Structures are given as structure tokens and as C-alpha cells.
Amino acid sequence: MDNHFDVIVIGGGAAGLTAGIYLSRAKLNTLILNEGAVGGQMVLTHEIANYPGIEKISGYELARNMKSQAQKFGCRIKSNIKITSLDLKEEIKKVTVNHNDVFTSNAVIIATGGKSRMVGAKGEKEFKGKGISYCATCDGDFFQDKEIIVVGGGNSALEEAVSLTKYASKVTVLHQFDHFQAFEYYVNEAKNNSKIDFIMESKIIEFIGDEKLSYVKIQNQRTKEVSEMKIDGVFIFIGYVPNTESLEGIIELNESKEIIVDKNLMTNLQGVYAAGDSIQKRYRQVTTAVGDGTIAALGAAEYINNMKKINEVAVSI
């Protein structure tokens, strides 16, 4: 019974850690299983300045604080593991880790998050980590006094472009449209930074180099003209895709491979909830993930309490 829990949370990002905090504080025996390091996409964010009640904090520090809080309430966390099997259809859910360890629970919350979307251009896979990055916090200091490109036109792209000017001598924001999707504040902040230039209506069609990235081929979307640009590095911020490949055929997904949930964040399977960037929703922020984790945890707690009442009635009969 050491491997049986009231709730297993799959994923240790903002949604998963929040769920762990709420469930453990409610005295439910809770386990968080996380592939990789705890924190999810949070730890890739250099600075979070719009989290209510906290003026400014790094994503890494916020993740660390959430993890510590969950553990203080009694939540167990296992990270850097590989989930190799899921059996979620029965009343007792089973999660197999590293092919050998089996954990069971009465309810499951899936909070597997997402991963950075790739441009899809020739050479991208070859130069990933060799000049191409998806994380300003992780790799920004490798480009001290270098010239870099930031791909994207949303809030994250412009926010990270500004943060990268602390390292790079020049940052060129490259966007496929003639306008940005970011809020006006982020657009103005980038435009007012003397280190930032802009190339609009364009996309990278090829990454080229020897041992590391040396230059890129850029195509203008309107004229189709192709030009080459010598560059030291490229940072890509064009959104995320959900980490749900292992869930296909297990729970219901939409065409974008996002998990379909009801208003209580329950999936099509009883006792299985989902939260965070892996679910079907419009906005993806740390705060929305925290909200999802809260709702899913409260739903799972209610589900378990109802199960216990039913079992108690059955025993008394």
C-alpha cells in the first residue's frame, strides 16, 4: 500500500504543483510524478512580473517556492522519471514508472504541460543547442556581446527579446506577420529599446553552419525574396504544443491534441482530471495554470470524498 495514493498528479509545472499544494493541504495522500526537472515552462521564464501579489520573480524561484510549499504540506514528488504505462479506465488508476514501479490512486490529475513549438525549417534539429535555443533564461549568457534573432510576435517573444538585450549586442525580432499579437506594453517596450531591430512579414527557411549556427536564410512572406543573414544565435518563441502524445487512445483529445475537459476540468474518464497547458483553452499563463490546478484539485478532492461516502454506506449495509 506504500505505492497507493488518493491522487496522483502527472506533471510538476505550475498546474501540477498547485494541485499538489491544494490536495496535500486537504490531507489527501498525494504524489506528483514529473518527467524531467520540476517547474515546467515556468523555469524557462527569465522574469515573471504579472503574478498577483509578487512584483517580480524569476520562473525558477517561483517553481522552487511552489515545490517547497507542496512538500511542506506532505506532498511526495518524484522527478526525472519516465512514465511508461497508464491505466486510467478502472476505479483504481495505475501509473507505471520506468517500466517497473507501479503506483495506484483513486484519482489522477494530468498536468503534462507543453513544449516549445519549432519553426520547422531545414537545419533546426541539427543546430538545436548549437546556436538555436528556446529558453532565454537557460542560454542568454552564452550570447554575451553577440548578435541574435528572436523569432515570434507574441508577448513571450517580445518580453524575452528585451531580456536578451542584457547579453546580446543586437537583437533582431523576426515575425511572419506585419503586426504583433502581443499586448501594447510589450510592443512599446521592445520598440523603445535601442538594441532591438525588426524584420516583419518574414520567416526563417533554413539554418546553416558547421559545428554551430553561422547564418540563416530568411524569406519575405509577401515578395518571396530570400536573403541570408549572418547571426550568432536564434531564440524561438512561437508558442507551445501540448505534451499529450502518450495520452492518445487513452483519453479524449481535440484536433490540436489538447485534452478535452468539462467545466470542472474532468476528462471523459471518471476520476481523471486535467489542468494547465495540456488542456483545451485559449490563454496560457502561469496564473491560468495555477487556476486550473486549483479547480482540478478541488474536483478530485470532491470525487474522492464522494467515493469514500459511497463505500462507507456499502460497508454499513
Image (tube, rainbow, N blue to C red):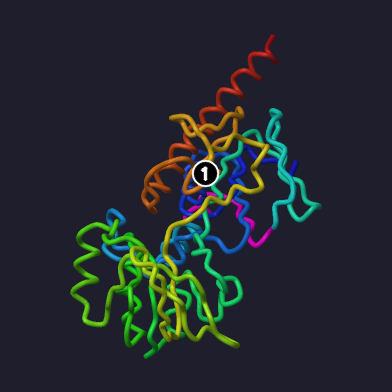
Where is residue 226? Give x, y as percent: 41, 75
Residue sitting at x 59%, y 87%: 210
Label 1 neighbour load within 10 Å: few <14, some 14-19, many 20+:
few
Question: Considering only vertical position in the picture, is 99 above or below 306?
Answer: below
Q: Is residue 70 magenta?
A: yes
Is residue 80 found left or right of 122 in the rendered image?
right
Q: Which residue is mark 1?
A: 256
Q: Nearer the viewer, residue 262 or 30?
A: 262
Is residue 56 found left or right of 99 in the rendered image?
left
Is residue 215 found left or right of 87 in the rendered image?
left
Residue sitting at x 48%, y 75%: 138
Q: Nearer the viewer, residue 117 or 227?
A: 227
Q: Amino acid at mark 1?
A: Ser
Where is residue 128? Give x, y as percent: 56, 74
State the SS at label 1.
Answer: loop
Where is residue 114? Give x, y as percent: 52, 54
Q: Nearer the viewer, residue 141 or 73?
A: 141
Residue 159's quadrant in the figure? bottom left
The residue segment tinted magenta is: 69-81
